[in-house]
Amino acid sequence: MQNTSPSSQPSPSSVTNTANTNPSFVLKATAMIIGMFAFLQVYSIQSILPVLMQDFRASEVQVGMAVGATVMAVALMSPFLGMLSDAIGRKSLIVGALLFLAIPTALIAGSNDIHTLTVWRFLQGLSVPGITVVTIAYLGEEFKGSAIAELMAYYVSGSVLGGFLGRFLLGHLHEWMGWRSGYYVMAGVTLVGALWVAKTLPASQNFVPSPKFRTALGTLSRHLTNRYVISATLLGFCVLFSLVGCFTFINLHLVQAPYQLTTGQLANIFAVYLIGVIITPLATKLIQRFGSARTIIVAVLISMLGVLTTLTSPLWLIIVGLSIMSSGVFITQSATIGYIATNVSEGRSLASGLYYMGYYAGGTAGAWACGLAYAYGEWSSTVVLLIAVQILALLIAAFGMIKTPMQRA
């Protein structure tokens, strides 16, 4: 008879140790794919706003609300998805959220008016935290050491790629087949992504459920006084405030003389996002070597330099400034979510949910406050506000974050 005693079986830690410290290429690709599909739909509608205004006879405010509906839903839902995930698990929620995301994406294609479309956009946003929040918790539980920073970098690279591809693909799909058919294609692609993740993402090995709501409330209370969570959440607010404020209102600046760019030319500027796909994985070594706090300080300074560069006149130099600015922002985001995953061991999904609530609240505030700044003094006043927020991020990283000892080269 075959010996099946516990002593003869390898322990879970010995089985998963290599995977936990040295993730495979497929797993890195899956982390990137999850990030990509999490953000593929969030801003995709921006590329067809003029068409929607014409088709639905909608005002600028109405189409703006259609853009913001998804962001608002993400901010509202993130903490609750964190609690739910801490109770029932990780992988099932990630895959389920991806599958659900395909439904309102397809329903947008059948919208009869801007208000119905806005409702479907809101439902899209409800599913996003089930991907973003839970993935951060999953990676923090299942992987060790440098593997966390590495996979987080691939995840953030995927989110950057998704933010670009959403705008790029839907804009071109509209030219080929109309935006309604384009949304059907986007829904189908999302479904394929869900099936890929279901097949390749390993099941949780280290998840410990916290099913009691009272326990979740206690965890929430502790997170609200946790220095790691608070500093990361405030940084998240500053990150998306800067990104949304900059890339929304630079368009208004560039349609004016002497640039007078067309809508297509403005859309092409979002290609600078692709730099983040390359630079974020490279930043992993910086995070591992110097720690999250020091890396963020340098990244914020780089981002501030990029914003100030946009005040120059030549168009090519403005594009360089946007590239520098966005690269600093993406490195900051990668280091911040890695900071949570590494340092928060209790209620990881809830901690991630609080981070994303602050992150998307920052995006909403950036669109509103930078709009007021642009109305007051156009792009120069907007830059002043962006620099002020980045100085706040610098102070948070310098004095609010706990610095880890630097590794020796």
Image (spheres, rainbow, N blue to C red):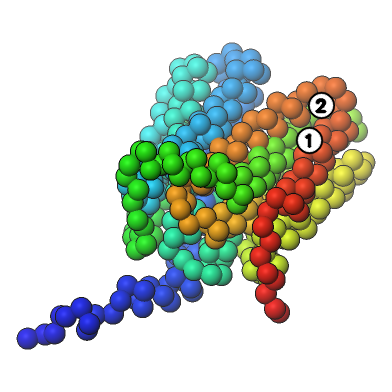
Residue 402, given in percent of the width and then of the height, sits at 67, 57
- Give whichever of 219, 235 is nearer the camera: 219
Where is 86 relative to 30, above or below?
above
User: Residue at image x 72%, y 56%?
Assistant: 296
- Give whichever of 206, 210 is nearer the camera: 210
User: Residue at image x 55%, y 16%?
Assistant: 56
Give left or right: position of 258 versus 251. right
Residue 344, given in percent of the width and then of the height, sits at 52, 55
At label 1, counting other C-alpha atoms closer than 10 Å, the crowd grade (few under 14, some 14-19, many 20 or more) is: some
At label 2, counting other C-alpha atoms closer than 10 Å, the crowd grade (few under 14, some 14-19, many 20 or more) is: many
Residue 362, given in percent of the width and then of the height, sits at 65, 35
User: Residue at image x 34%, y 63%?
Assistant: 205
- Give whichever of 402, 260 is nearer the camera: 402
Q: Which mark is residue 250?
A: 1
**SS assignment at label 2:** helix
Give left or right: position of 403 versus 108. right
Q: Which mark is residue 374?
A: 2
User: Residue at image x 35%, y 48%?
Assistant: 210
What is the three-letter code of the residue carrying label 2? Tyr
Single out the mark in the foreground, 1 or 2: 2
Residue 5, given in percent of the width and then of the height, sits at 16, 80
